[in-house]
Image: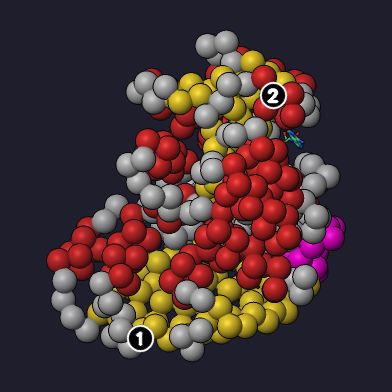
Amino acid sequence: MYKVALAGCGRISKNHIESLLKLREEGIEEIVSCCDVIPERAQEAAEKIGNGCKPYTEYSQMLKEADADLVTLCTPSGLHPYQAIEAAQAGRNILSEKPQGCSLEACDKAIEAADKAGVKYMVVKQNRFNPSIQLLRKAFEKGRFGKVYMILANVLWTRPQDYYDMAKWRGTYELDGGCLSNQASHYVDLVQWFGGDIKDVTSQFSTQKIKMEAEDTISVAIKFATGAIGSINATVLTYPKNLEGSLTILGEKGTVRVGGFALNKIEHWEFADEDPMDEEARRADTAPPSVYGYGHLPYYRHVFDVLEGKSQPMCTGREARKTVEIIMKAYGK
Ligand SMILES: NC(=O)c1ccc[n+]([C@@H]2O[C@H](COP(=O)([O-])OP(=O)(O)OC[C@H]3O[C@@H](n4cnc5c(N)ncnc54)[C@H](O)[C@@H]3O)[C@@H](O)[C@H]2O)c1
């Protein structure tokens, strides 16, 4: 059984713990320790995990003592690369929550540390596993779009001031970023996954309502090396609730729009040629249970397949860096 050490016992850690407890039942892994700077959170998580999971308040201490194969980072985003470096130096494989970090320099150092230590460094991008996105990828890889002209993502969501007031790290450039870095980072990842190498990024953004340092509304324009144009619009000011989380690809021989409130519906699927996957697209149960997509369980299955040597990692530190690069360019940093 793989041994997992989990850092950060806040909101998203619950999805990690739930998935990991299922995999424990299957004899795949065991969470041996968890840590949070807030002692009650570490204690509560350890009790939920059971089986002697040891709580810590010091990440470094946990790394020193826990005999873990994988360290999972569910801490504030800006800390991820620094904690990844420590984990790599301790010889542990790393699964970092998204985004990979809040500075390219820190992400580069983390990639370098993982390379040097010869450990696996993966970043959570669970939306790539949504059935609708998988199907879209299959069509794309088969060349059904012909030349891709434009890739658009809209993340028109709502977050109240209370959400930002929950923790000091939220909405700061150092540890979080605004709606592009936090809410839209999966969408940035998808746009670059389909768009490829980037030539230029420009943006307009502002903080209109939420009291925070970073932006609550942003529009990003990307020019890809192929000549295709990418466009990402994100806001947390949609009245009165989440309206849209969509990805649209316009190509020479095909148009697909995966929409709904969070990539949960194939709204348009049209290609010049016919293919058995068209029927699949019509029938697919593409509705994920929440804005987090299909959740972390399929992603963890993939991560343990990678550790087992059965799969290549879907999103390495290097792949995740591409998203951080777009975000940093959009922020002018
Ligand atoms: N994959 C997804 O769809 C998804 C969804 C939500 C959040 N996230 C990401 O997960 C991360 C955490 O978000 P959250 O909403 O759970 O935040 P949160 O504030 O609820 O949880 C973060 C936890 O980390 C703890 N922490 C802070 N510094 C620490 C340190 N040095 N060592 C150990 N613990 C420390 C905090 O006390 C807190 O309990 C963010 O990077 C966020 O972007 C990903």
Q: Earlier in the sequence, mark 1 or mark 2?
A: 2
Rendered location of residue 313, percent (x, y): 43, 50
Mark 1: give few (<14), some (14-19) or many (20+) Cα within 10 Å: some
Q: Quadrant of residue 217?
A: bottom right
Task: Say which quadrant the N terminus sits in.
Answer: top left
Q: Which amino acid type corresponds to the residue marked 1 in the rendered image?
A: Lys
Q: Residue 169 vs residue 98: left or right? A: right
Instruction: Check residue 115 in the rendering and tell me which mark sits there, or answer none.
Output: none
- Range of the magenta residues? 207-217
Q: Is residue 198 above or below residue 119?
A: below
The answer to whether residue 140 is seen in the rendering is: yes
Of helix, strand and loop, which mostly describes the magenta segment? loop
**Residue 216 within the magenta-colored segment of the rendering:** yes
What colour scheme has been applied to the protein in the rendered image?
secondary structure
Q: Which amino acid type corresponds to the residue marked 2 in the rendered image?
A: Lys
Instruction: Check disc 1 and report the residue beneath it.
Output: 147
Which of the four quarters of the rendered structure image does ligand 1 lie in? top right
Rendered location of residue 98, percent (x, y): 60, 51
Instruction: Check disc 2 and report the residue beneath it.
Output: 64
